[in-house]
Image: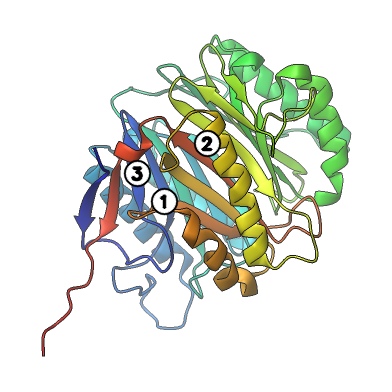
Amino acid sequence: MPREVIYTDQLMRPIAHFSHASGIDDQIHVGASAGVFPDLRLAGDVPGRVDMEAQTRRMFANLKTTLGLLGGQMSDVVRLKAYVADTRDIPKYLAIYAEVFPGFKPAHSVVGSWDFPLPQAAVEIDTTAIVGSQPRATPAGAVVAGEWHHAAALPAGIDGSTEQQIATVLQNLKAMLGEAGFSLADICNLHVTLADIRDYDLVLRAFTSFFGDRFPTWTVVGAPLERPEFGIGVESVAVKGGAKIISSALSPHLPGRPAPAMLAGDTLFLSGQGTPDADLSVEQQARANWQRLHALIEAADFPQDSWLRTNNVLTDWRDFQGFNRGYGPNVAKPYVPRATVLGVLPDRNMRVQTEGIAHRRGSQSKIVQVAPLVEQGA
């Protein structure tokens, strides 16, 4: 059965190879949502003026619309990540976020992105919802929805060295899992943001020691964090009972290193893929990344068109078109949602990194998309 496309005229027409959201079973994955109207006008009363408050309110309105088209609502959101172009605007964003989620709050992280493909966009979010699961927040701030556990661990209250912040974040994560009846072995995916990418080797050593041979999939990006004193932030997704490690000849699993992919039930998490080769263009790097992603999909015995979403990081917005030339041939219509942001990658020769989530029946998922343009006759 092919994907079902839900068309809408309430959201912007995509400017590249992506839709607004995908849904399968009770999962909804919403790609990058911005404070933009269907005609690509950014919210705000004054043309040319960046209005953070107006964009943030419109962005959350767009999220509500998108979720509704797939049978979800704001109270189903379990994970929300905000990317803010100017970190001085984070307090404005947080004030509106608190209005939108006055009671129950999802696992929430805020990072910087410096800029977006839409000129003068101030903020974007990408989101995960689990419909009908009645998610609950734990005392430490994680979210439990059925067999799923989402957390955002930060070094709050620690004004110490990078080593101390890393240790604190890992212990906070362990405590978040434990109070909800989960364990480290249940973690399937980690997303690590570093204020200084030069701390990458230090973080890798600490995480290797902490997780041992059950090191889950991970993606690492350098970007500003919610507070200037934070050196690290960690987002995690855990599934009760853990997951099976998936590898391939192109992405072998090395003991004590992150898993290339992890399969939890019918959901496949794939580590961020980058190609540190300075002689390759961004298009060639994107294609090389996808070769490994395709091989992991095959190793999991999934159909190639099983994707629910991808997240992509570029190091230079001038590479956006080249990235799309490498990305486009590897995804089929109707496209799945994605987020594409600006960040720093662990190897200076990497120009793009791609991670994703797939589902065994992803090719049967529902897709939210803008209706195609109708050509007018002569």
Identify the element where label 1 is drawn.
Answer: loop
Mark with earlier residue (3, 1) = 3
**Between 191 and 243, which is closer to the camera in this rendering?**
243
Q: Which residue is mark 3?
A: 22
Q: Residue at x 57, y 69 (%)?
A: 320
Q: Quadrant of the C terminus?
A: bottom left
Q: Nearer the viewer, residue 15 or 273?
A: 273
What colour scheme was applied to this rendering of the protein? rainbow
Inspect this view and state whether residue 223 appears: yes
Locate the N terminus and report the quarter of the image it occupies: top left
Q: Which residue was labeled with disc 1? A: 337
Residue 176, given in percent of the width and then of the height, sits at 61, 19
Depicted 351 relative to depicted 180: above or below: below
Disc 3 and disc 1 in contact, CB within 8 angstroms = yes
Choose top left, top right, bottom left or bottom right for residue 348.
bottom right
The residue pinned by badge 2 equals 297
Q: Characterize the local packing of mark 1: few (<14), some (14-19) or many (20 or more) Cα atoms within 10 angstroms.
A: many
Image coordinates of residue 56 in percent, x first then y, are: 43, 59
Three-letter amino acid code at the position of disc 1: Pro
Q: Nearer the viewer, mark 1 or mark 2?
A: 2
The Cα–Cα distance between marks 3 and 1, rounded to whole angstroms, is 7 Å
- Three-letter residue code for mark 2: Ile
Give the left or right position of residue 151, taking residue 24 as reference.
right
Q: Earlier in the sequence, mark 1 or mark 2?
A: 2
How far, Cα to Cα, is label 3 from label 2? 18 Å
Q: Is residue 25 above or below residue 46?
A: above
Relative image position of residue 252 (x, y in whole percent): 72, 32
